[in-house]
Amino acid sequence: QVQLVESGGGLVHPGGSLRLSCAASDITFRLYDMAWYRQGPAKTRELVARLRSGGSANYADSVKGRFTISRDNAKNEVYLQMNSLKPEDTAVYFCHARLRMEYWGQGTQVTVSS
């Protein structure tokens, strides 16, 4: 059974940093495009960053220069390093895997507040 398990969320002050991790199981991880989405209060889910199996990445304009997506194919993990966090980054962050099928994690809460 495919599982994506996120970790690393929490409460952080504006300007702070967090690193999210997503561990995948039961997929050939290196073949999958991996991504992070988020859904803020009363908002639709949006793409934050995607890292393709070939290594190219793209980011939402709102996080460019602050967030970095990376992956470790040996560990079947994908990460999201989030720096210079802002209150508007507050959301539930979801890990996403896509190849012929797509899978979602359960989400991890990130709250940016003073």
Image (cartoon, rainbow, N blue to C red):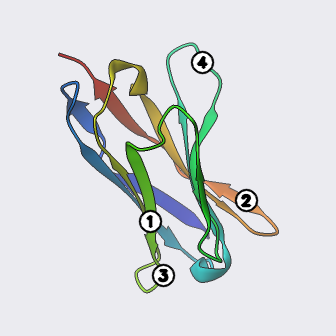
Which is nearer the eye, 37 or 1? 37
Nearer the camera: disc 2 or disc 3: 3
* Nearest the eye: 48 or 24: 48
Comparing 98 with 107, the one in front is 98
Label 2: how many residues lie within 10 Å, few (<14), some (14-19) or many (20+)? Answer: few
Mark 4: which secondary structure?
loop
**Vertical arrangement, residue 10 with respect to residue 78, above or below:** above
In what element is the residue under mark 1?
strand
Quadrant of the frame with the N terminus = bottom right
The numbered disc on residue 70 is: 1
Tell me the residue that label 3 is attached to.
73
Mark pair 3, 1: CA separation: 10 Å
Residue under the image location 61 percent in, 68 percent down: 2
Q: State the image quarter where residue 88 is shown.
A: top left
Nearest to viewer (mark 3 / mark 1):
1
Check disc 4 and give the amino acid type.
Answer: Lys
Task: Looking at the image, tell me whether mark 2 or mark 3 is earlier in sequence order.
Answer: 3
Looking at the image, residue 64 sits to the left or right of residue 13; the answer is: right
For disc 4, the marked residue is 43
Q: Earlier in the sequence, mark 3 or mark 4?
A: 4
Residue that numbered label 2 is attached to: 102
Residue type for callout 2: Glu
Query: What is the distance, in whole Å, between disc 2 and disc 1 at their CAs?
Result: 19 Å
Q: CA distance from mark 4 to mark 1?
A: 26 Å
